[in-house]
Amino acid sequence: MTDAPATPSRIERKRAQRVAELERAAARLFAQRGYDRTNFEDVAAELDLRGPSLYHYFSSKDDLLRRCLHSSSEEVLGRLRALADAPGPPAEVLRALFREQVLIEVRDFPEFAPLFLTMPVSVPEIRAIVLDVRRAHAAIFEDVAHRVVEGLAPDILRVRMSVVFGALAYVPEWYDPAGSLAPEALADELADTLLALFIAER
Amino acid sequence: MTDAPATPSRIERKRAQRVAELERAAARLFAQRGYDRTNFEDVAAELDLRGPSLYHYFSSKDDLLRRCLHSSSEEVLGRLRALADAPGPPAEVLRALFREQVLIEVRDFPEFAPLFLTMPVSVPEIRAIVLDVRRAHAAIFEDVAHRVVEGLAPDILRVRMSVVFGALAYVPEWYDPAGSLAPEALADELADTLLALFIAER
Amino acid sequence: MTDAPATPSRIERKRAQRVAELERAAARLFAQRGYDRTNFEDVAAELDLRGPSLYHYFSSKDDLLRRCLHSSSEEVLGRLRALADAPGPPAEVLRALFREQVLIEVRDFPEFAPLFLTMPVSVPEIRAIVLDVRRAHAAIFEDVAHRVVEGLAPDILRVRMSVVFGALAYVPEWYDPAGSLAPEALADELADTLLALFIAER
Amino acid sequence: MTDAPATPSRIERKRAQRVAELERAAARLFAQRGYDRTNFEDVAAELDLRGPSLYHYFSSKDDLLRRCLHSSSEEVLGRLRALADAPGPPAEVLRALFREQVLIEVRDFPEFAPLFLTMPVSVPEIRAIVLDVRRAHAAIFEDVAHRVVEGLAPDILRVRMSVVFGALAYVPEWYDPAGSLAPEALADELADTLLALFIAER
DNA sequence: AATGAATGAGTGTTCATTCAT
DNA sequence: AATGAATGAACACTCATTCAT
């Protein structure tokens, strides 16, 4: 009888929105300053709240980051998996994945992507969570890459994939959206460059 | 160049050695745990000292990291510059630079390389220092790369270089020296792969 | 005596019942965890309410405990006073008081008795209230005991009474109702033992 | 070589003394206010220190209480065991134990005894420690009491012992050393009263 | 009547840093 | 040179309490 209604009440929608806002604010600060240097007071201040108020929405700092990672990884991994499962020649699928990943980082989820890629995380348990997501993320690319270059020696493939992941992780550290290179142009150029690692006739 | 006397006394040599040992120990911990989670007590313990004793050698935690970065960057940038200035076709020089960088990371300075590449640094001033070193480091590669691909559009070149730096920075995060791939084999394979970004007949 | 109307409305009766339920739940938790470690949220949860709802019934946490103590002490002291005022030889009255006190603690009011006896109370004002009740409680026993041993030196009597109160207060800390000793058997045995302190021919 | 010297250095003696002073101060506050309401700042203030300074001597608040309990229980249990093992008729040994326990509480260790007897402890783990010490303490008395009344039914003996422990635990709650009853007189009177529970010819 | 939201006060704990020895 | 002692600043977290709905 008192189960969660299928259609969330107004109050529940408001709460969910607040949580989403807090997660976005927290993700921004986590990415900028790292987990250790981000405190509840500052996250709360982004929404004109005081630190302890966050405990109405998150049970701990750990939990806050966990939920940031979860919310965004759900969305991001979902989008990537949808592309990975799309029909078409593997090379084109891989290129599409590269494009999408770049756009996710610089255009669609600029706040969340650094959490997985470059956020300084010193606490071991938290780092483990990040690594888990990274593994799931990497698997999507690796599956498709496997289909592109079937006969490649595992060590060689691993090196190629490391170039891919390194390059993709590096994007938020150097790319300036206000510069001369549009996000879509970057995505195209980088996708082509990385794809060449797998289809060049060397 | 430095103000050190030409013939350092025995005491001075001993002190310099101590400093070097401390820097190495600190670099290891910084790289493992990040700047924030590394405390003076633990660094000192690596040499059977107590935390406050470090103040005989370093004026602050900030200073300790700064000196770690300085010492290692001196050495690393020196080695890379020597290679960059060597005669030979630019492409070969670039390949040599890639190889050297990989070997520096995984074989010769495994403790120091993460400081510049992957250490979680939350304090803005420290991060600025790291970025300075990275810029100097990048310049070495970029100069040579410029000579390899003279006519390439700046935006395109920048993307290619980002793949290089991303891939090189990523190495310590995934490479396992105990695995099947020897450091030198990795260096060769990665150097070839990255060089192909600049010499492929696309 | 109290201002309550002669015929409480249905709403008022419902409210009074709610207050009684809350007091009982609170008393249980207070006794188990102590005053400090008992929070409004947990007390409210016992009746499927949320913490702040308790403010409809109690003006503060302090007040909640006060009312717990008041309600139960009314009842308990009433029962004891009725016995103390009953006719009969003082020794028998005293024995009856001991029995009743034991039964109150282990059988009739196991939730409330610890409040006066063993609840950890750190807040000075609260402790003062508890001590007041204890004093009123002690006076009942002391009056009768006085009549049992009329000539006893005050210091000696005080020591004897301390044994009585100590023993009675200790009961909830060791007695296990699920053990081999029934509450009534315990009451009889303890009453006899304590009474012997006053009527032995020493 | 660097093992702890058999003869503690001056610095070690000073530290040990400081720890003892801190334990005494802490025990006083713990007993007065209970564990929850006693904070590091106040304990430290008793020795003109600030709160965090205590972490040089104790690893946590938990540890502070643990060491208070340990230090005092060592001493107290030692004294009681020595008496319990002394030769002589069991009844006299028991009487000596009662006297000693009273003197420990009111004269020799007035700060520490309440820790085991009446300190409000809400934290379950801490309470478990206190109960452990209480059990060891009780065992000393129970062993001797067993030899005094060999044939007594276990339930009856348990009730008698509960009177003993209750009465002894109650002493610090009512006895005023500034009153007309000297500690030794109290000890004698109480010891006689409690002993009568075991040797009366009922 | 009930509660979601919010907060101020308080507390245990960490740690870089200072200083006297 | 080394360190034991001490501390101020910072921070995660708890909770009684208030208030608008």
Image (cartoon, coloured by chain):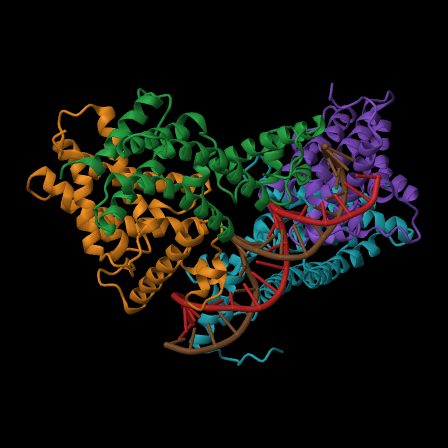
Chain colours: A orange, B green, C cyan, D purple, E red, F brown
Residue C161 location in percent, x, y? 80, 50
Residue nearer the viewer, C150 or B89: B89
Q: Residue furthest front?
A: B87
The answer to whether residue B3 is above or below residue A6 is above
State the count of labels: 0
Residue nearer the viewer, D62 or C99: D62
The answer to whether residue A158 is above or below residue C161 is above
Residue A65 location in percent, x, y? 39, 50
Q: Is residue A75 visible?
A: no
The answer to whether residue A93 is above or below residue A110 is above
Residue nearer the viewer, B158 or A90: B158
Query: Residue at position x 13%, y 39% from top?
Result: B202
Query: Residue at position x 83%, y 25% from top?
Result: D82
Quarter of the image that includes the N terminus of chain C: bottom right
The answer to whether residue D162 is above or below residue A35 is above
Residue nearer the viewer, C176 or C127: C127
Residue A99 location in percent, x, y? 18, 48
Residue D45 location in percent, x, y? 76, 53
In which quarter of the view is residue A127 placed?
top left
Query: Residue at position x 85%, y 41% from top?
Result: D190
Left or right: C130 with respect to D173? left
